[in-house]
Image (spheres, coloured by chain):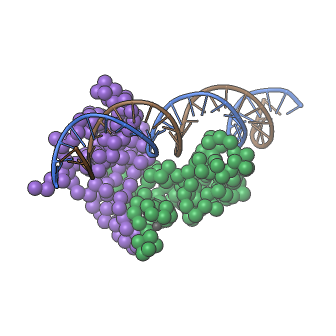
Chain colours: A green, B purple, C brown, D blue
Amino acid sequence: MNEHVHTTQDLTKNQSLVMGALSRSDGPLSAYTILDQLRDDGFRAPLQVYRALDKLVEFGLVHRLESLNAFVACRHPGCDDHETVAFMICETCGQVNEISDNTLAKQLKRLATDAGFALKKSTVELRGICSACAAA
Amino acid sequence: MNEHVHTTQDLTKNQSLVMGALSRSDGPLSAYTILDQLRDDGFRAPLQVYRALDKLVEFGLVHRLESLNAFVACRHPGCDDHETVAFMICETCGQVNEISDNTLAKQLKRLATDAGFALKKSTVELRGICSACAAA
DNA sequence: AGTGTCACGTTATTTTGTTACACGATTGCG
DNA sequence: CGCAATCGTGTAACAAAATAACGTGACACT
Ligand SMILES: [Zn+2]
Ligand SMILES: [Zn+2]
Ligand SMILES: [Zn+2]
Ligand SMILES: [Zn+2]
């Protein structure tokens, strides 16, 4: 009856197109890069991208990387704690690694609770050099 | 001999002005808000603000809030680990609380190390409702 | 004088994100 | 059926955030 889990089936045309662009990419994409990629599909204005992105983020299919002003497809869609996820961003190759560490999530929750802070969403973005780039 | 700790004494005129604006404010300020506040002091272009901000961040006197595109004066300048600090941002009143939790810092370092990731800087920004706003 | 460095100033441009308004499809009623 | 409410969409204009490009003056060191 109630269907809260959004799969690629539920998505509207524009949402599917944006989701497709993000899925195809091996790294994060800016809204305007997505727009450029979807010109041939009829996209003409930034708002079309941003509206789709808003929904996709809401559905838990996409994450926004605040420190990059960019977006990535979620690595493990369908899981619950999509508001408490961490990212490792390589400053050399641009690769993004999404990690879902339960200990970290709990720690952040505790930190917030201790301060009487009602936590809604946590942004954790680690910048550095990935193992592959360090080896090279 | 070696003096790496930057106080308000070392700052150039522009840096002092920007630092002053941030210190006066009780919340985060965007670069353009700072620019507007400093028009009477001779500021005319965004770049003047951004250059000062870059230095102030470098000196550890100011933090950038990635999820807000804004800047805050550091709460405890002079301390070491300015690359590993967390912020609680109230979505109601806009107040920002800077917290320096050692356990969290260690945890993030460990998380990175485990992935062979050379951590340079960590961004932790918690969004929610502060205790004051929750009470009201 | 010659060189390098650093802060500064100005203009223009790029990148990122939003506001405002209108249209069409769908759903849920009365 | 008729009608309102909702939602996704399309377009244009705009605002906000950040950078590029170029040049000036001050200072230190040689
Ligand atoms: Zn995810
Ligand atoms: Zn890498
Ligand atoms: Zn600080
Ligand atoms: Zn508050």
**Where is residue B18 drawn, in percent x and y?**
29, 36
| Closer to us: A1 or C9 | C9
- Residue A65's x, y, as percent? 49, 53
Identify the residue at horizontal 43%, vertical 61% (top origin): A91
Write the residue at 50% across / 49% down: A69
Q: Decide which of C5, B108 is in the foreground and name it.
A: C5
* Residue B94 visible in rendering: no
Residue depicted at x 68% and y 50%:
A38
Image check: A127 left or right of A97? Answer: left
Q: Is residue A56 above or below residue D4?
A: below
Q: Is residue B119 visible to the viewer in this orientation of the structure?
A: yes
**Residue occupying image coordinates x 29% and y 46%:** B55
Measured as percent of width and height from the top left, residue B31 is found at 38, 37
C29 displayed left or right of D6: right
Quarter of the image holding residue A51?
A: top right
Of the 4 image quadrants, the one containing the C terminus of chain A is bottom left
B8 relative position to A75: left or right: left
Query: D1 or B89, which lies in front?
Result: B89
In the rendered image, residue B81, in percent from the top left (x then y), is placed at 26, 58
Q: Residue furthest bottom?
A: A135
**Residue A113, relative to residue B111: is it above or below?**
above
